[in-house]
Amino acid sequence: MKYKIDKEKCISCGVCTATCPNAIELESDGKAKVINHKELEKCGGEKVCPMGAIEKISSEKEVK
Ligand code: SF4
């Protein structure tokens, strides 16, 4: 399973990095970035973000 961040929805709150430090980091613009999809899946996937900014994507083809 892979995930992507909807930067429009991300409010840079840091909840995801606090919950899954091995899976997500904040970029210089303050928005979240998935650095390890497997780790993110293990610690809750899209449910980690209270804003719904983490989206599940089924295949790499859909990554924009
Ligand atoms: Fe952005 Fe959601 Fe992470 Fe907060 S928890 S920084 S809104 S992706």
Image: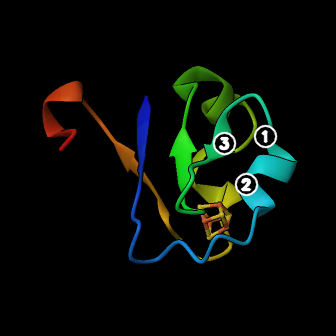
Which image quarter: residue 41? top right
Q: Do labels 2 and 1 touch, CB within 8 Å? A: yes
User: Which residue is painted at 64% across and 35% down in the image?
Assistant: 40
Residue at x 52%, y 62% (from the top left corner): 29
Q: Nearer the viewer, mark 1 or mark 3?
A: 3
Quadrant into which the C terminus falls: top left
For the residues labelled 1 and 3, the Cα–Cα distance comes to 9 Å
Place of residue 15 in the rendered image (x, y in percent of width and height, measured from the top left):
79, 62
Mark 1 is on which residue type? Cys
Q: Nearer the viewer, residue 52 or 18?
A: 18
Please tell me whether mark 1 sits on a helix, a strand or a loop. Answer: loop
Mark 2 lies on residue:
16
Which one is earlier in the sequence, the residue at label 1 or at label 3? 1
Question: Does ligand 1 reach within 8 Å of label 1's beta carbon?
Answer: no
Please identify the residue farthest to the front as the structure is shown: 28
Q: Which-is-in-front pick, marks 2 and 3?
A: 3
Which numbered tag is attached to residue 20?
A: 1
- 10 Å crowding of disc 1: few (<14), some (14-19), many (20+): many
Query: In this rendering, is residue 18 above or below 36?
Result: below
Cβ of mark 3 under 8 Å from ligand 1: the answer is: no
Mark 2: C-beta under 8 Å from nearest atom of ligand 1 = yes
Q: Position of residue 10 (x, y in %)?
A: 53, 71
Image coloring type: rainbow
Disc 3 residue crowd, few under 14, some 14–19, many 20+, Cα 10 Å: some
Quarter containing ligand 1? bottom right
Q: Which residue is mark 3?
A: 25
Q: Is residue 54 left or right of residue 22?
A: left
Check disc 2: other Cα within 10 Å, few if <14, some if 14-19, many if 20+. many
